[in-house]
Image: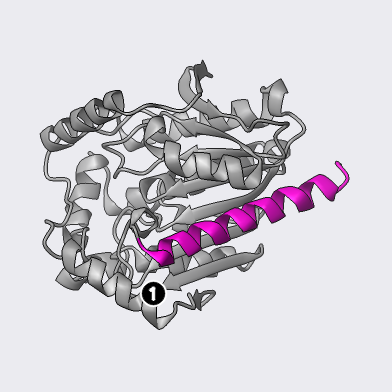
Amino acid sequence: MAHTRWPASEPELVQMRRFNKKLAWLPRFKIRNRITPRLIQALLLASQRLKKAPAAENRRVGGVPVRILRPEGKAKGVVLDIHGGGWVIGNAQMDDDLNLGMVRACGVAVVSVDYRLAVNTPVAGLMDDCLAAARWLLGDCPEFADLPVIFVGESAGGHLAAATLLALKQWPDLLKRVSGAVLYYGVYDLTGTPSVREAGPQTLLLDGPGMVEALRMLTPGLSDDARRRPPLSPLYGDVEGLPPALMFVGDLDPLKDDTLLMAERWAAVAEVEAHLLPESAHGFIHFPVAMADNVLAYSRRWISARTFQSRLMPSS
């Protein structure tokens, strides 16, 4: 398999185990209806209204809302950020803290896609939104026209980032502008990989077997064969021409197989790093632990290196 085990120290592992004991008290997330996600979304919006937001530009591009964060000086590159939230919760603003970290550490601008949510829109509609934003950034945005572009996606956002890259194969000149992709614990098979279907309670946070029915609910009217068709399930797509990628997943995540299988296929055509994090559950980059800080720091160094290398390469 095209992956390595993340080199965590014993103190880091002890800290993560301690945090996991707290996670074990939480119910595992499962999409059972469309009412609960709406309530969670309302709470998210209320909390965002109480928090001071950073300077950002909110605008519509290709009919899709995006949120743009810029560095103080000239941007060295631009990140297309696609947020997570199980396709049913979240918005572009929820990634402000992570995106500001990239802006400051890498000197990049960040364009975060505020795609529609699957409580009202089929997942294919969310994919259309992300593709429209990507086509604008890569082809119709003069401000960032000469900058290398990195895709970043987390969980459902990892799925949407990978699906967008596959869809961009229709426009090879646009796809060539993408210098890399950073994907955290994405979903790449909408019928459920073995680790999803066989996940037990030790996986924490996500109800793996429950995800199978949730994925069917989010893609109504489709058979499992239809759900496997790319780009809806990126795992089965033609990865030829995709850019280098950096991937992370925890070994307590039901989505472990999604990342490891996707990395194995992707590595056949491009440079891929995939890291399996010990003692780590889904969503670990948000945990207040040293391992998460180290992963984010590594990702930002990777982004900086990719943008630097791309700027050195002559344009074709």
Magenta region, main secondary structure: helix
Under circle 1, the secondary element is helix
Q: Based on the picture, tell me whether residue 244 belongs to the magenta stretch.
A: no
Q: Report the magenta residues as a range.
A: 289-316
Q: Which residue is mark 1?
A: 12
User: Residue 39: percent from the left, percent from the top?
Assistant: 14, 32
Q: Reply above or below: 256 against 125.
A: below
Query: Could you tell whether 102 is left or right of 211 in the image?
Result: right
Q: On the image, which quarter does residue 178 sit in? A: top right
Query: Could you tell whether 253 is left or right of 316 in the image?
Result: left
State the residue at coordinates (17%, 63%). 22
Q: Based on the picture, tell me whether residue 308 belongs to the magenta stretch.
A: yes
User: Residue 94: percent from the left, percent from the top?
Assistant: 36, 36
State the residue at coordinates (42%, 61%). 292
Q: Quadrant of the C terminus?
A: top right
Q: Amino acid at mark 1?
A: Glu
Query: Could you tell whether 134 is left or right of 39 in the image?
Result: right
Q: On the image, which quarter does residue 221 sit in? A: top left
State the residue at coordinates (49%, 33%). 112
Q: In front: 228, or 65?
A: 65
Q: In front: 17, or 170?
A: 17
Q: In front: 115, or 112?
A: 112
Residue 269 visible = yes
